[in-house]
């Protein structure tokens, strides 16, 4: 009688959903993960792209701190939230805080 070889126990593969959920688990906070591009900041403050560019140039908006391929392309959400709050006490006389535009359809 011929003996059959037993196959090794195979670890079950994760489903696609399980892989996605495990990839989402991140130790960083939400404000560290979110990136705002100039168009997002323009929508947030109800400003046109040239105005956002001028605000960057004049120092009323912090320097971009998110880089792709070595080029600055946007801001982390925490950076924009700090700009909206204004300067820290005793930090000299930097520009006034940026007021966020209210949407027309907000209740």
Image (spheres, rainbow, N blue to C red):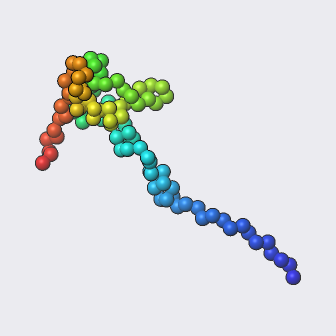
Residue 24 in the image, given as x and y percentages of width and height: 44, 51
Image x and y of residue 76, in percent: 36, 34
- What residue sits 22% from the left and 26% below the top? 89
In the image shown, does 44 or 93 lie closer to the viewer?
A: 93
Query: In which quarter of the view is residue 61 placed?
Result: top left
Image-based side of 37 in relation to 16, left or right: left
Above or below 33: residue 74? above
Residue 101, percent across and down?
17, 35
Q: Residue at x 43, y 46 (%)?
A: 27
The x and y percentages for residue 2 are: 86, 78
Q: In this view of the protein, can residue 54 be seen by the observer?
A: no
Instruction: Please state which of residues 52 and 22 is positioned toward the viewer in this rendering.
Output: 22
- Relative to residue 62, is residue 100 drawn left or right? left
**Image height check: is 25 above or below 41?**
below
Residue at image coords 47%, 59%: 17
Image quadrant containing the N terminus: bottom right
Q: Quadrant of residue 83?
A: top left
Quadrant of res 4: bottom right
Vertical arrangement, residue 70 with respect to residue 36, above or below: above
Q: Is residue 9 left or right of residue 78?
A: right
Give the residue at x 34% y 24%.
Answer: 63
Q: How many marks?
A: 0
Q: Is residue 14 above or below residue 27?
A: below
């Amino acid at each position: 009688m011929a003996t059959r070889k037993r196959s090794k126990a195979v670890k079950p593969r994760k489903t696609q959903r399980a892989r996605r959920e495990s990839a989402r688990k991140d130790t960083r906070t939400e404000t560290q993960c979110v990136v705002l591009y100039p168009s997002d900041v323009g929508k947030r403050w109800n400003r046109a792209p040239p105005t956002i560019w001028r605000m960057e140039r004049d120092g009323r908006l912090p320097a971009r701190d998110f880089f792709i391929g070595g080029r600055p392309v946007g801001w982390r959400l925490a950076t924009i939230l700090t700009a909206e709050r204004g300067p820290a006490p005793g930090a000299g006389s930097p520009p006034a805080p940026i007021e966020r535009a209210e949407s027309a359809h907000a209740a």
